[in-house]
Image (cartoon, grey):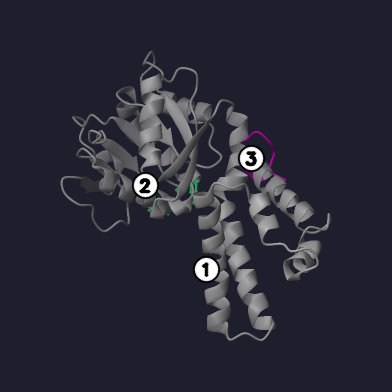
Amino acid sequence: MDAMLPPLLLVGCGNMGGAMLDGWLKEGLAPSFIIDRHRPSVPAPHHLVRSADEVPDSFHPGMIVLATKPQKVDAVMTAIAPFALRAPVLSVLAGRRAGDLTDCLTDALPAGSPMPLVIRAMPNTPSSVGQGMSVCYAPPAATAAQRALCTRLLRAVGDVAWIEHEDEMDAVTAISGSGPAYVFLLAELLEEAGIAEGLPPDLARQIARQTVAGAGALMVRSGVDAATLRRNVTSPGGTTQKALDVLMAPDAWPATLSAAIRAAARRSRELSGALPVS
Ligand SMILES: NC(=O)c1ccc[n+]([C@@H]2O[C@H](COP(=O)([O-])OP(=O)(O)OC[C@H]3O[C@@H](n4cnc5c(N)ncnc54)[C@H](OP(=O)(O)O)[C@@H]3O)[C@@H](O)[C@H]2O)c1
């Protein structure tokens, strides 16, 4: 069995921070500090504090994890900067570049301090059931051990991949970060379409939800590519073919989905300051 995860300083424990914490607690986590204004409790021997100022100076985290909303992180930088001299920072904030966060921490430290290291990750909400997808980016200064620790932390809540160019994080955010919302929308629309076709609402909901869940599970467990699985359901001239003729028309899903992903990726670039807000 792997050794326990090192002590963490988790800053923000809402949807995403809480999902990750659940995975880490299951894996076994050395006594850690969790900063959050709303979470009711954390199990012993971990410590829940309401403000970053309450973390004792003597605490030596193995990693600091930033999981506040992107616009709220600046308020905690001064308080956590001293800890960033002892441990790398893993940020899951959408649209905040590693260099930008490093600069914020550096500004909060005495002149001449070593430069803090910030690694970025984009997880998603299925992390709360151990089925997340996290994509990480580390600046060249990160060591193999620091990368391996990030992989281990995020593997506790799902699958992990690395990118070598931070610019790719905008497309990753648009696909896997925001993507669960598109899949939930598909379930909503299937349910509405079922009701419109005359099905009882409960049945429409049950078959829509289980179809989305079952198709995802089949894709993962079979390891077969999505296009082959789609063809396996599609008899020439049959019912599925008729629906796919509508959905796969060039101006239907192919155009709509690529426009949606472009819009989300553009918003991620705007949030990171790489593009002016339109
Ligand atoms: N949710 C997703 O699907 C998803 C996916 C990928 C990445 N992310 C990233 O994950 C981050 C967190 O998102 P989320 O959905 O988990 O947000 P969230 O539910 O609002 O959680 C953030 C928590 O941090 C607390 N907090 C913020 N500043 C604090 C402070 N100074 N002291 C104490 N507590 C503080 C917040 O309290 P207040 O509400 O009082 O500020 C809140 O409880 C975001 O940066 C987002 O970009 C989210």
**Label located before the other in sequence (2 or 3):** 2
SS for dot 1: helix
Q: Amino acid at mark 1?
A: Gln
Q: Amino acid at mark 2?
A: Met
The answer, for residue 108, to whether it is visible in the render is no
Q: Report which residue position mark 1 lands on.
A: 210
- Work out how far the residue at label 1 is from the one at label 3, CA to CA, in angstroms: 28 Å
SS for dot 3: helix
Mark 2 CB lies closer than 8 A to ligand 1: no
Could you tell me if the residues under marks 1 and 2 are in contact, i.e. CB atoms within 8 Å?
A: no
Q: Amino acid at mark 3?
A: Ala
Give the residues in magenta: 267-278
Front of the two marks 1 and 2: 1
Q: Position of residue 46 (x, y in %)?
A: 20, 45
Q: Report which residue position mark 3 lands on.
A: 171
Where residue 208 sits, quadrant-wise, is bottom right
Q: Is residue 39 left or right of residue 140?
A: left
Residue at (73% x, 67% y) in the render: 240
Instruction: Tell me the crowding category of disc 3: few under 14, some 14 to 19, or many 20 or more residues within 10 angstroms, Cα based.
Output: some
Q: Is residue 271 above or below residue 205?
A: above
Residue at (67% x, 76% y) in the render: 193
**Quadrant in which the N terminus appears:** top left
- Work out how far the residue at label 1 is from the one at label 2, CA to CA, in angstroms: 25 Å
Q: Is residue 272 above or below residue 211?
A: above
Q: Report which residue position mark 2 lands on.
A: 20
Could you tell me if the residues under marks 1 and 3 are in contact, i.e. CB atoms within 8 Å?
A: no
